[in-house]
Image (spheres, rainbow, N blue to C red):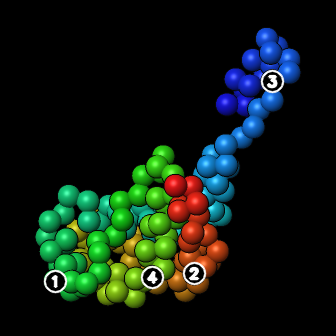
Amino acid sequence: MKKAGKALKVIFPKMLHVTCAAHALHRVAEEIRVIFPDIDRLVANGKKIFNKAASRISVFRESLPAVPLPPQPIITRWGTWINAACYYAHYFDEFAAVVNKFDTDDAASIGAVKALLQKPSVKRDLAYPLANFGRLPDCIT
């Protein structure tokens, strides 16, 4: 958008480019994702564990009937990654208990998530986006 604005400024010299507030908030959400690479891997691999795996979904629903399935964030949909990070912060222990029931040899994503869940920094890092940016997706909307 900035590049297009500069090109149009030649034709319209009095034109001003004003960045949309939603675009600015989306850029903030993208920077948060970059700052927390372990959370990004947890979100990405947590999505893969239950994607097209009916048996794992049924184990999750039997173990945690009141807890929703992990979200399926799409990076280009604004705020979905923050929502997913907030989900994992809120249901960290419950999610970890279900994932630990799965066999690591079934999928690479299960092994990756189990390794991330063992890191003490992951749970601490999840608390930061929840506390400071949990309302950001609503603001974007």
Distance CA(mark 1)–CA(mark 2) = 27 Å
The structure residue drawn at horizontal position 80% and vertical position 15%, both measured from the top left corner, is: 12
What percent of the width, then of the height, locates residue 1? 67, 31
Question: Which mark, residue 127?
Answer: 2
Along the polypeptide, which appears first: circle 3 or circle 1? Answer: 3
Distance CA(mark 4)–CA(mark 2) = 9 Å
Which residue carries the number 1 mark? Answer: 62
Identify which amino acid the numbered label 3 is placed on.
Met
Which residue carries the number 4 mark? Answer: 90
Along the polypeptide, which appears first: circle 4 or circle 3? Answer: 3
Distance CA(mark 4)–CA(mark 3) = 46 Å
The structure residue drawn at horizontal position 19% and vertical position 72%, both measured from the top left corner, is: 56
Distance CA(mark 4)–CA(mark 1) = 19 Å
Along the polypeptide, which appears first: circle 2 or circle 3? Answer: 3
Label 2: which secondary element: helix
Label 1: which secondary element: helix
Which residue carries the number 3 mark? Answer: 15
What percent of the width, then of the height, locates residue 71? 36, 65
Distance CA(mark 2)–CA(mark 3) = 43 Å
Mark 4 crowd level (few <14, some 14–19, many ≥20, 10 Å Cα): some
Image position of 127 (left or right of 80): right
Q: Are marks 1 and 2 in contact (CB under 8 Å)?
A: no
Mark 1 crowd level (few <14, some 14–19, many ≥20, 10 Å Cα): few
The structure residue drawn at horizontal position 42% and vertical position 52%, both measured from the top left corner, is: 74
Between 65 and 32, the one nearer to me in the picture: 65
From where the camera sits, is residue 109 visible? no
